[in-house]
Amino acid sequence: MRWNLKSKPEKQKVLQLQNELQVNEIIATLLVQRGIETFEQAKTFFRPSLNDLHDPFLMKGMDKAVKRIEEALETDENILVFGDYDVDGTTAVSLVSSFLKQLSPNIDTYIPDRYLEGYGISFKGIDYAEDNGISLIIALDCGIKSVDHIAYAKEKNIDFIICDHHLPGEKLPDAVAVLDPKQADCPYPYKELCGCGIGFKLIQALTQKKGQSVEELLPYLDLVATAIAADIVPMNGENRILAKHGLTVINSTPRPGIQALIQNVKKKTLTITDVVFIIAPRINAAGRIKHGNEAVALLTEYNLEQALQFATEIEGYNSDRKDLDKQITLEALNQIEENNERNRFTTVLYQENWHKGVIGIVASRLIETYYRPTVVFTKSGDKLAASARSVQDFDLYAALEQCSEHLEQFGGHKYAAGMTLKEEHFLAFKEAFEKVVQQTIHPDLLTPEIAIDMAIELDAIQPKFIRLLNQFEPFGPENMAPVFLTKQVVDTGYGKKIGQQEEHLKLFVKSSTDANSEGYGVIGFGLGNKLSITEARKPFDLVYCIDENEFNGTVTTQFRAKDLR
């Protein structure tokens, strides 16, 4: 691990904010590091308000989209809500379809089959619309590059509204309206919404047009918060507002589908991290193992008993997903060793029987061992399909663009992508990708970095400090959980390895320089091999986040160790 201690912000800015907010220097420094320098900015950060959401009609194409939907509702047209099979897609479809079903009975949903149709808008989906007399398709979390598909639909007199957040290609599809803030000429002020977020702006516009308040849409925000968490979009601006209010809904009045997923969780209050690790994988498991329709059925079910039944089935898929994930990761690691590929700049692997639903997770797992851009292929019909993941600060999408001559199609963003190619092009792609990455990646990026906000002493961790720190949530890109460095701590003798493979580390630390300092429990996931550093009361430096641990109804402060040395 590379430890990178952030440089201190301008002292005058910190002092000024300290005085304005009446907080200590650590809190003021953390805020200035996040670009929050005034009382008003701090107020917006700590008290995100739905009133601060932008006018949805600022988004290019919104007028046309709303007009076409209103027309369809007035004339009783059949509308199909179409979306991808991941969390962002299935929550977006659940959001828009459940909203529209209050206005019309003629609403249907469609999630493509991951294995038979692949990612995005499919010809099969358009044929389904034609067979069912559907004249308008609203596509969510996909479609920005589906030029041929939209042309095919147009031949069949089927209109499209595209709601996407991925980067557009050179040519836009010929749809009635294209909602995507990443279009070069879209004036919408916030560019980082997820697909479900774009869907929310669409229903916000429809609500606003009727003269109703955005408060009416609060019950939908559990879905939006789940998508924001799962899609790892920046946790600032509108995403922060939507996630914060969505978390409140999840913790107070979640829809039956989400209630069913979290019924066995012992925690009183879920954080965005809990959404990432508890809710999102289960929603994803439906599309990975069975079909994304199962996730939509769960998330749009209003009967709790029925939702609990759906959730039980999804729990089974998630269990299968975990088993497959472990097995394929092991096979992939063996393949790297057998082919003597440890010293490459990239990992590009292929095995025809690997399960297409988990290769993205496997790519992420491989990065934990070999920290480099990773692409994992499996057989899909007569082609190979892959999921790719990147390392921090390396633009995977740009690297794939330089290898596009070997690919049939690809899509995604800086850190994650999907692609297909012909089997005979696999080796050529593998070598081209290795060459591009070798020529463009900075050597430092091949070692994982821990960005440390600041060094503090243990005595700075007081109850008021923790209360304020908790208000920095929800955490995510652009607002990560603060990372602290405390030097010269010692374990009090309780240190041990825990976990099935003794892969984790459990400690109880105090300051080595202050005998009266408060002690704190520490959990270090994946740090079991560092126990020797802490033994015999040897002082060590600790990098950590401050968490709250809830056990048997008692909440205690706990450190989540990132590294120690």
Image: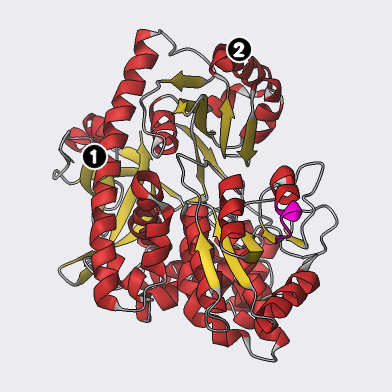
Residue displayed at 40% across by 38% down:
361
* Residue type at numbered disc 1: His
Q: Position of residue 412 (x, y in %)?
A: 61, 41
Q: Which residue is mark 1?
A: 504
The label on residue 135 is: none
- Residue 15 relative to residue 336: left or right: right
- The picture places residue 109, in percent across and down from the top left corner, at 51, 64
Type of residue at label 2?
Answer: Ala
Circle 2 residue? 428
Q: Secondary structure at mark 1?
A: strand
215 is higher (above) or lower (below) than 13: below
Mark 1: give few (<14), some (14-19) or many (20+) Cα within 10 Å: some
Magenta region includes residue 155: yes
Magenta residue span: 153-158
**Quadrant in which the C terminus is drawn:** top left
Q: Residue at x 62, y 52 (%)?
A: 142
Q: Is residue 32 left or right of residue 486?
A: right
Camera-side residue of 156 and 212: 156
> Visible in this render: residue 561?
yes
> Could one spot residue 475 in this view of the protein?
no
